Amino acid sequence: MNRRSDRSVASGLDRRTFLAAAGAVTTATGIGMALGPDRPATAAGPEDVAAAKAAAGAPSPAGTTLASVAAPRGTGGYRRLGDGPGWPRLVRSELAAAQGGRQDRRTALASFVQFTDIHLTDVQHPLRYEFFRAGEPGAWRPHEALTLPGVVSLVERVNKLRRGPATGAPLGFAITTGDNGDENARIEVEWFLTALSGGRMDPNTGDPRHYEGVQNSGLKLYWHPDTALRDDDKQRGFPRIDGYLDAANRRVTSPGLNIPWYSTFGNHDLLSGGCYPAAGTFLHDVAVGNKKLQIIPAAEAKWLMEGEAKGDDPKGERIREMLRAHRKEMRTVTPDPRRAPLTARQYISAHLDPRYKGRGPVGHGYTRDNLDTGSLYYSFRISDRVVGISLDSTDPGGHYQGSLGTGQIRWLERTLKRYEDKYALVFSHHPSWSMDNLTPDPARPGEDRHDGNELISVLQNHNNVLAWINGHSHRNRIRPRGTFWEIATASHVDYPQLARVIEVTDNHDGTVSLFTTLIESAAPYRTDFGDLSQTGLASLYRELAYNAPGADGSLAGAAGDRNTELLLPRR
C-alpha cells in the first residue's frame, strides 16, 4: 500500500470506528460500515486509539468454537450430541513470520461474520432432487425441513456474540457467500431476506393444511419421523418423533441480525438444484406445477448424478427426459406460485425491497445499477483502510461449478486498482478449486469464462489483496496463495453447521493478521425429542445433520482450517 495512505490512518482506527467502539454510536456503524464508499471519515489520533482499545472490551472465546464444540456421545447408528472441547487457535506463518509482542501493538481494521451455504429449503417443492437418494444415501438430507429454525439460531448466536473473539472489536457486518436458498424459488429468497432482516416466516408451502413431501410418502427411502414405518433411516437408528412434521411447518420468527449485512450470489440462488437454468425454461412450469417425482431407479439416479458431476448436461435435458418418462409415477401436490424461479434481476429486486432492509444497507450490497445491468458483483466500504469486493462466480449457462466472465474480471482489476491504497477482502461463492466451469453465458455467448487459477493470478497482481473468502465446498479449508490467503468456510446445512468470524489487524511490525474463528448456532447441543419448540428444532437440526447417512465427516477440516491467525507481510 502507498506510504501516504499508511500515514493518514496509521492508528488503524478512524474517528467513527473509535466512536462505535466507545459505544457512542450504534452497532450498525462500527468497524464494518454500511454508509457507502464516499462517506468521509476523520483519522483518529493516539488518544482515540487508546480509548477505543479500552472500550472494545477484552477478547473472549465465549460463544465460539474456541470454547466448546458439539461432540457425539455413545455408540450406535444414531448418536446424540453434547458439549465437547473447543478447537485451539493455530498461528499460520507460511506467508510472514510471527513477531513477538504483536498482541499488545495490534489495532483492528475489520471485524465481521461470514455465513455461507445456508440452503434455506422448501422441502415440499415439486422440483427437488430427493430421488437422487436412490443412488446415494447422502443425496438427501433428513434434517432439511428445519433449515429455518436453524438459520434463526445462527442469527441469535451472532447477536449474542457482538464482538470479535480475537480483538474485542465490535462486529461491523455480516456477509453471506452464496447458496442462501436451495432451489432458486421466490419463497426461499423471501425466507432468506426475512431471516437476516427480521420477521416471521411460514415454512409451509402448497396445501396450507397438510405436508406434501417425501417424509410422508410411504417410501422407505426417506425418514418418516411421525410414523411407525421402518424406513431406511429408522433402521439406521433414527428416532420416531410424533408431531415433527407439524412442528417443522409452524411459523418461525427471526429477530434479524443486529448488524448490517451483505449478500453474495451462489449457484443454488440461480440454478435449479444448483445445476440447471430454471427461469424461463421447462423447469419453471415444473416448479409451480402440481406433480412431484419422489423416486427413480438407483441406476438412473447414479447416471444422472455422474452427469452432473462431469457437467455433461448443463441445460438439464436429461432431467427433462427423466421427468417425462416418470410422469405417471408422480405424486399430485398443491401448486404454489411462490415456488417460481427468479431471474438475476428479480433476485436483485427482492434485495432492494424496503421490507427487507433490516439493519441495512438497502439492497445489502446490490444497487439500482445492479438492477439495471443484471450484474451481481459490487464493492463496499468496510472501513477507512479496507474495502470489500463481492463477486458473482455462478455460471448462468449451467453446472454447479463456477467461473467469471471477462467483463467481471476486468471490473475486478479496475476496482482493485481504484482502491490500491486500501486493503481488499474479496468474497465469492466458489473457491478456486471449484471454478473450472467454462460453459458460455447465454446472455454473452461470445464472452470468455475464466477459472479459479486465473482469478488467483489476478489477485496476486494486486498487492492490496489480503484474502479471498468463499464457500460452496461445505468444507473448512485455508490455503496460502503467495500474496494472500484463500479462506473457504463450511456450510450451515451440513454438519458441523458453522459460520466464521474474521478479524483483520495491523500488527504495527510490518505484518497484518487475519483471525478466523468458527461459530455454531446458539441452539443447545443436547436435544429433547419432546421439545418441538423453535429452539428445540434448531438443536435437532444439528443432531440430525450429524447423523445424516452418507455425511462427510471431514468437512470441519484440519486444525489449520478452523481457528487461526493468518499472517501476511504489510504492504
Image: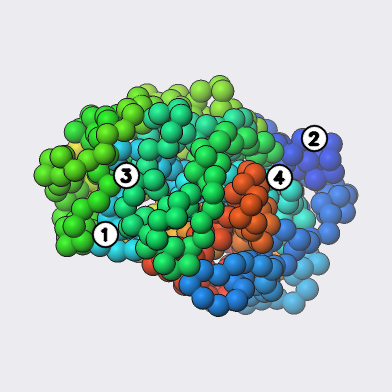
C-alpha separation, residue under disc 2 versus residue under disc 4: 17 Å
Residue closest to the far top: 354
Give neighbour class at mark 3: few <14, some 14-19, many 20+ (Cα, 10 Å).
many
**Type of amino acid at the residue the image marks with label 3:** Arg
Helix, strand or loop at label 1? It is helix
Residue 206 at least partly seen: yes
Q: How is the image coloured?
A: rainbow
Could you tell me which residue is drawn at 59 percent across and 30 percent down? 200
Quadrant containing the C terminus is bottom right
Q: Quadrant of the N terminus?
A: bottom right
Image position, residue 457 (x, y; %): 37, 61
Q: Earlier in the sequence, mark 2 or mark 4?
A: 2
Earlier in the chain: of badge 1 and badge 2, it is 2
Q: Which residue in the protein does label 4 denote?
A: 159
> Which residue does the numbered mark 1 point to in the structure image?
134
Residue 268, compared with residue 288, is above or below; it is below
Q: Nearer the viewer, residue 2 or 300?
A: 300
Frontmost residue, 536 versus 225: 225
Q: Which residue is mark 3?
A: 128
Label 2 to label 3, Cα distance in Å?
45 Å
The answer to whether the residue labelled 2 contacts the one labelled 4, judged by CB atoms less than 8 Å apart, is no
How would you rate the neighbour count of disc 4 (Cα within 10 Å): few for under 14, some for 14-19, many for 20 or more? some
